[in-house]
Image: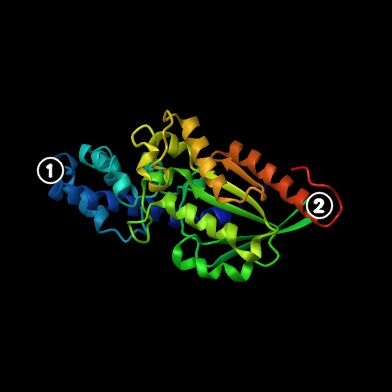
């Protein structure tokens, strides 16, 4: 699928993973105590590990040693923290929190070095524009990774000119959650609104459209507890609620945003599943190559 990250590149993720792990438990501690005092059945949310909680709450998020690892492990096994975790749709918590908590004893060991799974699960917000250049079959590609937060979107426009293909990524699992920025706007609604603006952007009218509905694994778990109708733009859904039917419906809702005269390719993905990503990326690579060659009059498009 591509060359592996170099050791120094892998090492650069250590502070991100440590920060992800500690800040996520800090969030759970805060919400545990908040729910305990505000909810009617608040007692079930209160953790029973005050010393561990204080150690984590006072952390600068830069160091995760054995003692802190044990504290996080103790909290993670606490019934109150588990009850609070089950309400994660009500507040902001990164999707990889559970993974890091389950592996905290490994991560907190002296000399620990992240593996590819650890790196893939890490979360750092994209700020500004990150440019990556690579070559496929003697063709040069330039990929612009743009920050999805509202504050970052104004920076996109200067990079729209001459774009062959737009790769739009939306978390299909975000249907029952709100944005980090305001805690109010439904994430699926925001994704659809932004996709619509992207489709209508004048400078992108000749660009191919590829949509990734990502985090299908988390989506499969979420729909067991929350119907997709909790999301405003999906409230009119009347299907059987199965994973397949829900995916089909959401795919169709995004397809409606695109004019019938303009093709769009949609993939349901899991970015942490290497095999799935390889298949999807190979498909996109072929798509972009075919479209580019067709535009240059060198071959007819295969899609």
In depth, the one of 86 and 251 nearer the eye is 251
Q: Quadrant of residue 220?
A: top left
Number of numbered discs overlaid on the protein picture: 2
Q: Position of residue 40 (x, y in %)?
A: 12, 43
Say left or right for 299 vs 239: right
Quadrant containing the C terminus in the rendered view: top right
In depth, the one of 269 and 52 nearer the eye is 269
- Mark 2 vs 1: CB contact within 8 A: no
Specify whether residue 54 is in view.
yes
Q: Position of residue 198 (x, y in %)?
A: 57, 59
Q: Residues within 10 Å of mark 1 (few under 14, many from 20)?
A: few
From what the image shows, is residue 276 above or below residue 199?
above
Which residue is painted at 25% across and 43% down in the image?
84
The colouring scheme, among rainbow, by chain, secondary structure or one colour, is: rainbow
* Mark 2–mark 1 distance (CA, rounded to whole Å): 63 Å
Residue position marked by numbered label 1 in the rendering: 40
Which residue is painted at 45% across and 49% down in the image?
111
Q: SS at mark 1?
A: loop
From what the image shows, is residue 133 above or below residue 41?
below
Which residue is painted at 44% across and 49% down in the image?
188
Q: Position of residue 142 (x, y in %)?
A: 69, 60
Residue 294, numbered label: 2
Specify whether residue 109 is in view.
no
In the rendered structure, which disc, 2 or 1, sits on the residue that comes first in sequence? Answer: 1
Residue 113, numbered label: none
In depth, the one of 281 and 135 nearer the eye is 281
Q: Position of residue 183 (x, y in %)?
A: 33, 57
Q: Residues within 10 Å of mark 2 (few under 14, many from 20)?
A: some
Quadrant containing the N terminus in the rendered view: top right
Query: Foreground mark, 2 or 1?
Result: 2
Q: SS at mark 2?
A: helix
């Amino acid at each position: 699928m591509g060359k592996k990250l170099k050791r120094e590149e892998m090492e650069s993720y250590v502070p991100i993973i440590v920060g992800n792990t500690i800040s996520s438990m800090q969030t759970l501690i805060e919400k545990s105590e908040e729910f305990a005092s505000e909810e009617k059945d608040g007692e079930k949310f209160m953790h029973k590990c005050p010393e561990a909680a204080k150690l984590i709450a006072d952390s600068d998020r830069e160091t995760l040693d054995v003692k802190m690892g044990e504290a996080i492990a103790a909290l993670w096994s606490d019934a109150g923290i588990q009850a609070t975790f089950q309400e994660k749709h009500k507040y902001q918590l990164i999707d990889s929190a559970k993974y890091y908590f389950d592996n905290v004893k490994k991560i907190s060991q002296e000399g620990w070095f992240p593996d590819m799974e650890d790196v893939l699960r890490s979360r750092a917000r994209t700020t500004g524009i990150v440019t990556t250049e690579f070559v496929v079959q003697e063709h040069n590609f330039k990929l612009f990774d743009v920050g999805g937060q509202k504050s970052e979107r104004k920076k996109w426009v200067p990079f729209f000119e001459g774009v062959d293909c737009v790769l739009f990524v939306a978390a299909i699992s975000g249907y029952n959650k709100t944005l980090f920025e305001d805690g109010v706007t439904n994430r699926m609604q925001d994704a659809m609104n932004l996709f619509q603006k992207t489709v209508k952007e004048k400078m992108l009218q000749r660009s191919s459209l590829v949509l990734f509905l990502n985090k299908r694994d988390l989506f499969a778990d979420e729909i067991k507890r929350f119907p997709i109708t909790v999301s405003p733009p999906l409230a009119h859904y009347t299907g059987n609620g199965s994973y397949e039917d829900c995916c089909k419906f959401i795919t169709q809702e995004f397809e409606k945003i695109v004019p019938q005269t303009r093709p769009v390719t949609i993939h349901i993905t899991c970015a942490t599943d290497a095999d799935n990503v390889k298949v999807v990326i190979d498909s996109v690579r072929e798509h972009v190559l075919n479209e580019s060659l067709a535009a240059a009059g060198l071959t007819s498009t295969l899609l």
